[in-house]
Image: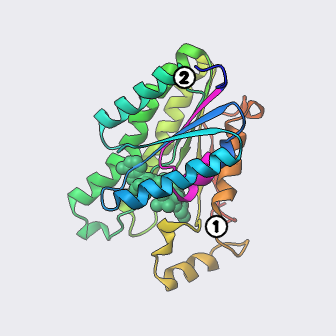
Amino acid sequence: MTEKTQRTVVVTGGSRGIGRTICCELAAPGTTVYFNYFNPGDPEGEAAAAADTEKMVAERGAEAKSSAVDVSSTEDVTAFFSGILKDTGRIDVLVNNAGITRDGLLVRMKEAVWDMVLEINLKGAFRCTKIAGKAMMKQHSGRIVNIASISGVLGSAGQANYAASKAGLIALTKVTARELAPRGVTANAIAPGYIITDMTATLPEDVKAEYLKQIPLGRGGTPDDIAKTVNFLASEDAAYITGQVIHINGGMYM
Ligand code: NAP
C-alpha cells in the first residue's frame, strides 16, 4: 500500500450506470477505486467511458484505476485482483455490480443465453468474492456489497435467467455473511427496482409505463438512489448490518 492510500475499493462494472455512480460515491481522499468493465462489442467506447469515470473519481479527490476485465473469466479476474493486491496489499470494499440482462420467455430461452447471464451475474460475483473475501479475512475487516435486483425476489416474467442469477446472488450474500462474520467482514445485498440507466433505456415504452404504474413513489430510481446506500453499507456506521437485502424500489415491492 502506498503512503497516500488508506482504503482500497473494488467495483465491478464501473464504466457507466449504477457502477459509475458507486465509484464516485465511494471516492474520498486516501481511497483508490479499482473498477473494471468489459464490452468486446465496443472496446473503444467502453475505454472512453471508463476514462470518464476515472476523471469523475479524481474530481472527488480519490484515485481511480480501470481495467478491461471480464468477470466471466476466472483468468481475467485472478489477474485483476493479483494486480490490486500487489499494488495496495488490501481490499477494504468489494462491490459486485457488473451485470447483464438477456430477456426472453422461459420456454424459448436458449441454454447459451441462460449460461451467459448466470456466468456474469452470479459466477462473476463468486469469483470476485472468493479472492477479495480471502484478503478481507486476513485483514479481519472488509465490506462486500452485492447488487442484486427486485427481479430476484419477484421472479419477473421474461427474466428466468436474470431472476435466477439475482436470487442466487442474494443466497451467495447470506452465505458470505455467515462465513466471513467471525473475521469482522460484512456482506449485504441491495435489490434495486426500476433504475434509469442504459440497461433499462432499451425497454419498450409500454413496459416502462407499466413499471411506473407499479411504483408508489411515482418515478424510476436514479443511480444515486443506489450508490448512497452502497456508501452507507461500506462505512463504519453499518458495522452491525450483515446478511441483509436492502430493497430500493420506490415501494414497487414491500
Ligand atoms: P449498465 O448501465 O448496463 O452497466 C453494466 C456495467 O456492468 C457496465 O459497466 C458493464 O461494462 C459491466 N459489465 C457487463 N458485463 C460485464 C462483464 N462480463 N465483465 C465486467 N463488467 C461487465 O447496468 P446498470 O443498470 O448500471 O446495472 C448495474 C447493476 O445493477 C447490474 O448488476 C444490474 O443487474 C443491477 N440492476 C439494475 C437495475 C436497473 O433498473 N438498471 C435494476 C436492478 C438491478 P461494459 O459496458 O463494458 O460491458
Where is residue 169? Give x, y as percent.
46, 44
- Find residue 197 and name its label: none
Task: Please rate how many residues cluster around mark 2, counting C-alpha atoms within 10 Å: few if below 14, some from 14 to 19, many from 20.
Answer: some
Q: Quick check: is the Cβ at mark 2 less than 8 Å away from ligand 1?
A: no
Residue positioned 64% across, 71% down in the render: 220
Up the image or down, 203 lies above or below 140; here it is below
- The part of the chain drawn in magenta is 7-23
Task: Please rate how many residues cluster around mark 1, counting C-alpha atoms within 10 Å: few if below 14, some from 14 to 19, many from 20.
Answer: some
Quadrant in the rendering for residue 72:
top left
Query: Relative to residue 129, is residue 39 drawn left or right?
Result: left
Q: Amino acid at mark 1?
A: Met
Q: Residue furthest bottom?
A: 206
Q: Badge 1 is on which residue?
A: 252
Where is residue 6? Give x, y as percent.
67, 24
The quarter of the rendered structure image containing the N terminus is: top right
- Residue 14 shows in the view: yes
Q: Residue furthest left?
A: 111
Residue positioned 42% across, 69% down in the render: 157
Up the image or down, 89 lies above or below 27; here it is above
